[in-house]
Image (cartoon, grey):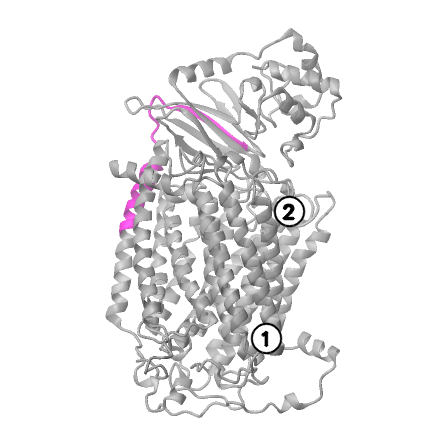
Amino acid sequence: MQAIRYGEHFASRLLFIPDGGKTSIFRPAGTSAHSIFGLSMLVLTITLCIFLVVASLLLYVLLRYRHRASSPEAEQEPAQIYGSTQIELSWTVIPVLIVVILFLATARVILSSEQPHEPPGALDVIVIGHQFWWEYRYPKLGIVTANELHIPVSDSGHPTPTYLTMSSADTDHSFWVPRLAGKMDLIPNKVNVMSLESQAPGLYLGQCAQYCGTQHAKMLLRVYVDTPADFAAWAAHQKQPPVEDANAALGRGIFQQNACISCHTVAGTVAAGRFGPDLTHVASRDTIASGSVINTAANIRAFVDNPAHFKPGALMPPMHLNEHDLDAVTAYLMTLK
Amino acid sequence: MATQTPTTAVLDQASAQGQRPLWLETVQDWVTTVDHKKIGIMYICYALIFLVVAGFEALLMRIQLAIPNNTFVSPQTFNRLFTMHGTTMVFFVGMPILFGFGNYLVPLMIGARDMAFPRLNAFSFWISAFGGLLLYFSYLGGDGLYGMGGAPDVGWFAYAPLTERVFSPGHSTDYWTLSILLSGIGSIGTALNIVATTISMRCPGMKLNRMPLLVWLYLVVSLMAFVVVSPLTAAQIMLMLDRYAGSHFFDTQAGGSAVLWMHFFWIFGHPEVYILVLPAFAFANEIIPVFSRKAIFGYPAMVAATVGIGFISLSVWAHHMFTVGMGAWANTFFTFATMVISVPTGIKIFNWLATLWGGRIHFTVSMMFAVGFLFQFLIAGLTGIMLSVAPFDWQLGNSYFVVAHFHYVLVGAILFMIFSAFYYWYPKMTGRMLSEKIGKWHFWLFLIGFHLTFDLMHVPGLLGMPRRVYTYEADRGWAILNMLVSSGAIFQAVASLLFVSNLVYSYFKGAIAGADPWDAWSLEWSTTSPPPPYNFAVIPTVGSRRPLWDLKHPEDPDSNYEM
């Protein structure tokens, strides 16, 4: 374990570019990412050794046996050697042994991490990939949200891992939060399961890692690992019905009379579309546009006016609202805390 | 038994004495030719044109990615660029350039006068060439009915269901499908031709175990191409049926399978990497011995390793799919198969090392590129081992680390070896030497650019940057690295221009090469440079793997030692 710490430290020093590491695979903060990190250090060590041995041999040979015009034998052909069975055997057997070691170490990690046995305290989340955003549904808690995944922190005495059941509504996507776990693809007509577990509260970033269409680049991931108290408070808030602010009645009306409701849901209202993100508590999120823009009134206004302003290729069309209606709808959305 | 008919150096150049042909006659001569050498050269020229085009596409992408949140090109344009870059480089640069050298060299090296099926050869070239033109015609004709203009934008492996009509309306994807289909027909034709030629056209005395290693490797490559191009072609037809005939192979909304496409594509796609890299190994097998002045070390082991790679490469494809949820046992199997293939590959590197050992190494430009190949292929192999470790791949897969890895193979190994082959065989093809002076500039600039770009490209992948993003967030720590990666591209572009100008300049002004400028040992050097249309006035007879060594050293012929 100590060795891994040192390795971690060394790798971070070696590879970190200023302010990097928010999404570095060498700064694991989740159970799965840790086990991959351990294995990857073994692999890196072995491959580095092979490189040093072979590259120095190569360098030696190139320097030692370079043609020197001044040498007395320069014009003669060197001794011709056609091969040697013993030598061939030795450089076949040694690589085979290395492969066996690597394979056994790898198989152990694959087999242990790919057989999920869900403990009783586990949280279930259904993840559905969309062009170009993430839908999160918590069936046991009755919560539906988008783009910002909240999970409880897990401690080793009382593990509360989160099990993600993943699929896609359209094309292939891939869920990759490097500091928490390796990636898992979201494939339409197929269900994949992965577990996410972290002992360190915080915000972990990532993004879609399978090309899924025009706006693949801004399909960002945000995973909030909350303390138990924070998670309980967040869940309780999300279960509330949407705020009914009388001041926003005008905006609500415009929202409900326009095409907005064919794609978006605001729980308990006529807005029950499933094509776009659930907006019941949209104002409580830190970001909009799948993590690519900070959630402010000005940004929401610009996004509703023309989503391509932030995300060219996003499937939401420009809403063609006049300035007055835009302001009203923005005001309404900002009340949906 | 070591004596054989001296081969036919400098026979007649009488044909060169006649009147200069009219321009149109020259064109007609090339368009209607069935001569394997002319077809080979056309393959190579065609590939070079596309190399410049696809290289330019790469340059545009690197400009876009040099700084975060850049708006140099739109996401749509960027997605088309990486799709066209990948498709072009694999199908219309890599395949034709390697088939071009194969076409040119295989008959000459086995002492034959042409390929087994010269007309099929011409057909294969023209159908592949048409495929490439069709792909680029999509920039004009890809609009379709829906105004979804321009070139395909589904990525070079075109994962379903993004290619279905719901997600890719218009005709751009159809251009992609059809051009791959045509290039596949061409590849199968040429593969068939090379197999038939090596099996039935060898000169007297050239038993299978005396064939030059280059020919052995092309034989294995061609057999592989047979096996693996067919599933690709099948998948393209299935996709066409999905798009226009209402079938649902990959149409997930009607119960089709996205994973099915991945299997079809990668059972082609991974062996394809070996189809591209084995010819590079083939060049190394000829060039490294000649410039070390030694016979290749362990010929039988080299053949065995090649055949081994050919077989094992058919069982590794799903290492591209470690993250699709195939289950633990499938992942374990494909991890194992992928690791195993490193053993025969390692044997090759060790044998090249042993060939250099005790030699007198002449650092011509050709050899410098070959040395670059050795180091870079070593590194590419080791990052390949990292990626074969499925859990490590869950982190590295589809990140810039993968992009760096396969460019290390495709550029660092294959393209370096192609450059090496150009410096080595250009004199045979044209009768003139390439300039070593320009060549050295080409080598060093390209080497610097290559390492600046592709060494550093590994790091953003480790820091979480996925591939195929048209832009990225400023706060991830990827910006400086991407700027450096992009700046390396400039060195490579300049070096490539130098290379092309060297090809043109030396064609007119290069030193006269003579039949055998490198004092080499295989049959192509026994005829004139360039060889006459019939290659050899008298079909040679060989008594060993290095017939010209035997001629030059009659007192100590190879056949005394060969295992």
Magenta region includes residue A115: yes
Pointer 2: what residue?
A: B243
Q: What number of labels is visible?
A: 2
The image position of residue A285, as x and y in percent, is 53, 21
Q: Are marks 1 and 2 in contact (CB under 8 Å)?
A: no
**Label 1 chain ID:** B
For residue A79, side relative to residue B98 (left or right): left
Identity of the residue drawn at 38% across and 87% down? B550
Question: Callout 2: helix, strand or loop?
Answer: helix
Left or right of residue B389: residue A250: right
Say if residue B219 shows up in the picture. no
Q: Quadrant of residue A2?
A: top left
N-terminal-most mark, 1 or 2: 2
Q: Residue at x 39, y 30 (%)?
A: A196
Establish if B28 lies above or below A99.
below
Q: Is residue B544 magenta?
A: no
Q: Secondary structure at mark 1?
A: helix
Question: Up-down: is A221 above or below B63?
Answer: above
Magenta extent: A101-129
Alpha carbon of mark 1 to alpha carbon of mark 2: how far?
A: 49 Å
Name the residue beneath numbered marker 1: B506
| Disc 1 packing (10 Å; few <14; some 14–19; many ≥20) | many
